[in-house]
């Protein structure tokens, strides 16, 4: 590669970074992962033993990941823009490495830069590089270096024993960044079997490749042995394997597959294209004996092994306990490398123009989808981060250290609640405590048995949270937003909330002390009917100060949109100074139905619904004592099972109260 070509290539790679990845530098605090990283980085000496000890009982051992972010904190402090600079440069470096490999094989800057663009955009990219705390970019960088060192000795720099030493070191760095890097063993095994097939046709070339992959297996075996050494230097500190202990079932694999195909069809499409083209290329060269331009046995075996490595990652993730879009970062990269390599080889061969157009069309469609998805997710992440940090700083300023912060949008057991406490401690405003209310306000938050079991949350814990409602002088923080696209972003989207639920239900006398909203247009597929839309999307917050002593009313089992399932309960405060009137209706798809109303445990009224007309019921009169009501539906219906939409809830009726006056 000439100096001129090298400079053009590096310049284009930097431009790609500036366009697609640099906006991540505008992000700030985020309640997931980042608070823990800062906490560990700022108290590194206290956490060092925990980082290097593999026997903590968690089932995970990723010391390089923790040390990487501790180093970030040591160098950059809480300047997260520099964190993002480091992470995004790591990822674009991985892309540039693979682009350089293709450039050396194809002798064309177009192919190299084109691959860098493809790797830099895609549905798994945004969450991986626009949020801090994901191990994927770091592991991706080390695994990419490992593969390049194996393939060509890092472009001829490393040979012999130096090459083997570098491979062992990079394998350890990869494995200690993310455990799934162990899949490199599958890469080596595939290389062994494919080279055996090549040896049947071209004995000398195949034998050399076969021996090289056997040596690689030996290198990986040595690396795996070394990775176990720390386990013998530390005593076992605990035994909490819950994170990695779960049951793999066909329903789990099916649900994960449907999630990834729906969320990331671009990854799946590139995977299919790469597998088909490499299979065709191999068959064409070694069975039809048709020579391809620039044919190289070692490159073909390497790319087929890469493709199998990508599919090994993909299939392994189908068996993990939950799907996350950012998990697919490295498989997506491998599929794109293989698809571009094989596409270039095959399309310059005997295939005519129609297959070529189909290939380019598929690449264009997958890339366009990836760009749209990436914009939506990246925009949502940056918006939320800015809003979140602004909300916490506003609370610190307004509260002066007094009054608890009640997070209406998160359940008490969520990572966001603990993370927010750590952020406030860093900002100097945690004296009064942080608590989550979402589980007491939204039944959907407690309809997660696997997560609750994993976190050790019991029914008694959930019941107890109803005693933790705000008191006078506390602050309620509600995140608002309109993110109704199908694309999933952990902790951010999909999400729709226009107002605080406590304010909407008139549960308290509340004073709005600050608010903020960020909005921008975006393309997305609607969460409700999957139709494509271009609409304004937004993320915001509203911070309220509680003025009343206790809640006027407390709902249980009522969804934020007013729907009730099989049963809803309501406790009305004894100090209300007006009649309490309920409005109840049943949708047409739930007819006929009967709603039984119990007052303090005694049947109070039964309502028969034969049509969708709303019925009004006076539950309690002015001046009456405190009461508890239960609304029980005879039957419920799931809109999803009826084929109406994607709403999987079992719904029985709509319920609301007439305005309840202020407490005396």
Image: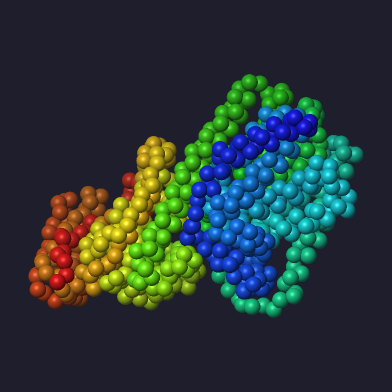
**Residue at image point 10% right, 67% down:** 578
Residue 413, located in which quarter of the rendered image? Answer: bottom left
Q: Which of 422 and 602 lies nearest the eye of the viewer?
A: 422
**Residue at image point 56% right, 40% down:** 20
Q: Position of residue 654 (x, y in %)?
A: 23, 56
Going by the picture, which residue comes out furthest to the left?
622
Q: Which of 534 and 22 lies nearest the eye of the viewer?
A: 22
Total marks in image: 0
Q: Is residue 135 visible?
A: yes
Residue 102, located in which quarter of the rendered image? Answer: top right
Q: Is residue 593 above or below residue 349?
A: below
Residue 499, located in which quarter of the rendered image? Answer: bottom left
Q: Position of residue 540 (x, y in %)?
A: 37, 52
Q: Is residue 188 left or right of residue 382?
A: right
**Residue at image point 14% right, 51% down:** 613
Q: Is residue 128 visible?
A: no
Q: Position of residue 320 (x, y in %)?
A: 57, 58
Q: Position of residue 1 (x, y in %)?
A: 78, 32
Q: Is residue 418 left or right of residue 156?
A: left
């Amino acid at each position: 590669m000439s100096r001129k070509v090298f400079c053009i290539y590096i310049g284009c790679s930097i431009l790609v970074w500036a366009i697609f990845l640099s906006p991540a530098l505008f992000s700030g605090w985020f309640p997931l992962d980042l608070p823990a990283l800062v906490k560990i980085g700022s108290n590194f000496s206290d956490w060092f033993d925990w980082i290097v000890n593999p026997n903590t009982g968690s089932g995970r051992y990723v010391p390089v990941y923790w040390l990487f972010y501790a180093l970030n904190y040591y160098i950059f402090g809480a300047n997260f823009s520099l964190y993002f600079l480091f992470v995004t440069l790591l990822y674009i470096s991985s892309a540039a490495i693979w682009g350089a490999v293709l450039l050396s094989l194809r002798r064309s800057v177009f192919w190299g830069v084109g691959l860098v663009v493809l790797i830099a955009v895609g549905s798994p990219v945004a969450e991986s590089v626009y949020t801090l705390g994901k191990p994927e970019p770091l592991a991706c960088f080390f695994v990419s270096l490992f593969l390049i060192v194996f393939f060509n000795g890092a472009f001829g720099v490393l040979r012999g024993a130096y090459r083997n030493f570098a491979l062992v070191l990079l394998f350890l760095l990869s494995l200690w960044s993310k455990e799934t890097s162990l899949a490199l063993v599958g890469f080596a095994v595939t290389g062994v079997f494919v080279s055996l097939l090549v040896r049947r046709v071209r004995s000398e070339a195949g034998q050399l490749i076969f021996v090289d992959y056997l040596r690689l297996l030996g290198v990986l075996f040595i690396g795996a042995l070394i990775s176990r050494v720390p386990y013998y230097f530390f005593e076992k500190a605990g035994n909490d394997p819950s994170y990695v202990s779960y049951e793999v079932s066909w329903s789990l694999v099916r649900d994960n597959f449907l999630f990834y195909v729906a969320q990331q069809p671009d990854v799946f499409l590139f995977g299919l294209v790469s597998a088909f083209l490499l299979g065709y290329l191999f068959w064409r060269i070694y069975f039809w004996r048709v020579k391809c331009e620039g044919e190289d046995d070692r490159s073909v075996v390497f790319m087929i092994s890469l493709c199998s490595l990508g599919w090994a990652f993909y299939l392994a993730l189908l068996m993990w306990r939950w799907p996350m879009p950012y998990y697919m970062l490295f498989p997506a990269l491998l599929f794109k490398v293989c698809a571009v390599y094989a596409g270039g080889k095959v399309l310059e061969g005997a295939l005519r123009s129609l297959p070529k157009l189909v290939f380019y069309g598929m690449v264009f469609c997958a890339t366009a989808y990836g760009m749209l998805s990436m914009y939506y997710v990246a925009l949502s992440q940056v918006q939320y981060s800015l809003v979140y940090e602004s909300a916490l700083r506003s609370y610190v300023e307004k509260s002066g250290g007094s009054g608890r912060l009640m997070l209406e949008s998160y359940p008490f057991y969520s990572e966001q609640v603990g993370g927010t406490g750590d952020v406030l401690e860093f900002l100097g405003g945690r004296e009064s405590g942080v608590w989550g209310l979402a589980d007491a306000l939204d039944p959907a938050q407690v309809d997660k048995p696997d997560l609750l079991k994993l976190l050790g949350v019991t029914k008694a814990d959930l019941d107890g949270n109803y005693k933790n409602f705000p008191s006078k002088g506390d602050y309620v923080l509600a995140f608002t937003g309109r993110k109704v696209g199908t694309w999933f972003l952990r902790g951010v989207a999909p999400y729709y909330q226009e107002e605080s639920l406590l304010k909407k239900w008139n549960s308290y006398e509340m004073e709005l002390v600050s608010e903020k909203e960020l909005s921008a247009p975006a393309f997305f597929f609607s969460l409700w009917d999957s139709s494509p839309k271009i609409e304004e999307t937004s993320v915001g917050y509203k911070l309220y100060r509680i003025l009343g002593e206790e809640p006027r009313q407390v709902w249980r089992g009522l969804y934020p949109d007013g729907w009730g399932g099989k049963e809803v309960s309501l406790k009305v405060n004894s100090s209300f100074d007006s009649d309490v009137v309920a409005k109840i209706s049943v949708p047409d798809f739930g007819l006929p139905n009967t709603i039984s109303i119990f007052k303090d445990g005694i049947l109070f009224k039964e309502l028969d619904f034969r049509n969708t007309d709303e019925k009004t019921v006076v539950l309690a009169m002015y001046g009456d004592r405190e009461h508890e009501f239960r609304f029980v539906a005879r039957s419920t219906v799931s809109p999803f099972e009826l084929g109406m939409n994607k709403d999987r809830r079992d719904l029985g009726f709509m319920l609301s109260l007439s305005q309840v006056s202020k407490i005396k």
